[in-house]
Image: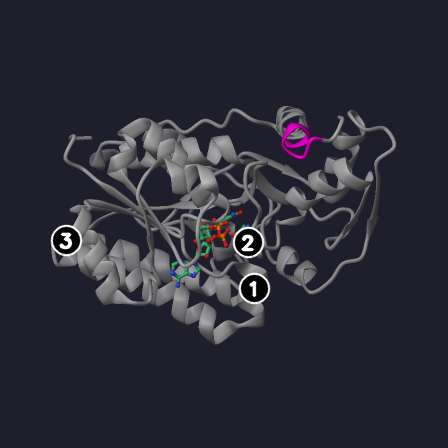
Amino acid sequence: MPQTDTILVIGSSGQIGTELVMNLREQFGSSHVVASDLKDAAPEVMESGPFETLDVLDRQRLHEIISKYKVTQVYLLAALLSATAEQNPMFAWKLNMESLFHVLELAREGHIKKIYWPSSIAVFGLTTPRDNTPQFTSIEPSTIYGISKQAGERWCEWYYKKYGVDTRSLRYPGLIGWKSAPGGGTTDYAVHIFHEALKNNQYTSFLSENTMLPMMYMPDAIRATLEIMDAPAEQIRIRGGYNLAGMSFSPAEIAAEIRKHRPDFKIDYAPDFRQQIADSWPRSIDDSEARNHWNWKPEFDLDKMTSDMLINLSKKLTVKL
Ligand code: NAD
Ligand code: AKB
């Protein structure tokens, strides 16, 4: 990346943004990575480089920030996630789509060179094969969040084909990390369970015992994001959203894994409205295209992720493992 490139991360105070900004600053230099969000970010983000308060729905303000810093790349992370979106569908549609339109249009007008916009396993629906879900398959999402991701993928590809806008996108599975809290998704239980295991040795899961979902440890997700953005344009042959896989497990399986470190840990189950969302998503993902096109390879499986989560989270929470 040439020295003159500057990155704007929109939604930098969320689960992914908190970690992504720090990684981008390490790689590209703090002054070249501008964090922005409605709310203040974690202290490490606020203190290590520029931060701008931004409502991404305010196109004028977004344009001002892009001009002020001569931004060339945008990572658009602001969105309502699956569970929150189901409870506020009209606003979710507005936020998830208008934010993307603002960024795509600013790119079409020549203000930005490259866009990262995350999609999700939520693009898939009840007519999709649930095991080893392929890249190209039936895509009929049944949540507002999934519909917004499906539409966003199509818009990203359309701007690429029509105007040559360099859009890149990954269909993240549920993401698990110890540095930041999840923001209203169906896969959030897989983060909550670690906090509750360390604090109370007990967790009540809002998904049922055998609900298998695709998941990924945050270091893998951040690396995949940086790798797809760094890859030469000709290697990016899918402009909608690449399937991306790390691991798959159910609440019962992750509880068993945690018990290897905390033998007294107990789990029970009280499925709520999120169960129906989870039941419409794949159990596992085939990410051959990402592996073949730009050499993607995950590092963390369930065993390795669980050990790393427990070690780091126990230090952060100052709880004995
Ligand atoms: P998050 O909810 O943790 O963070 C989103 C951030 O956006 C928040 O800090 C919020 O304050 C900010 N935001 C909301 N409205 C805004 C607005 N109008 N203007 C500016 N900022 C605003 O979400 P996340 O988990 O970090 O996810 C980021 C992106 O990745 C989303 O598009 C999400 O759909 C996608 N994704 C996440 C996961 C996951 O497991 N975390 C999985 C698949 C896809
Ligand atoms: C959610 O559960 O909504 C997200 C996702 C998989 O997109 N974590």
Task: State the residue at coordinates (44%, 56%).
Answer: 39
Query: Of residues 245 and 260, which is closer to you in this image?
Result: 260
**What segment is highlighted magenta in the picture?**
313-318
In which image quadrant can residue 26 be found? top left
- Residue type highlighted by circle 1: Thr
- Residue type highlighted by circle 3: His
Label 1 SS: helix
**Is 18 displayed left or right of 107 in the figure?**
right
Task: State the residue at coordinates (37%, 27%).
Answer: 295
Q: Earlier in the sequence, mark 1 or mark 3?
A: 1
Task: State the residue at coordinates (49%, 31%).
Answer: 219
In this rendering, is residue 46 above or below 62? above
Query: Of residues 58 and 130, which is closer to you in this image?
Result: 58
**Is 270 displayed left or right of 37 in the figure?**
right
**Is 188 displayed left or right of 166 in the figure?**
right
Residues at badges 2 and 1 in contact (C-beta under 8 Å)?
Answer: yes
- Tell me the quarter of the image containing the C terminus: top right
Real-space CA distance between mark 2 and mark 3, rounded to the nearest whole angstrom: 30 Å
Counting from the top left corner in percent of width and height, residue 40 is at 44, 52
The residue labelled by disc 3 is 111
The residue labelled by disc 1 is 84
User: Badge 1: few (under 14), some or many (20 or more) residues near its Cα, within 10 Å?
Assistant: some
The residue labelled by disc 2 is 183
Label 3 SS: loop
- Tell me the quarter of the image containing the N terminus: top left
Give the tally of numbered discs. 3
- Residue type highlighted by circle 2: Gly
In this rendering, is residue 132 above or below 63? above
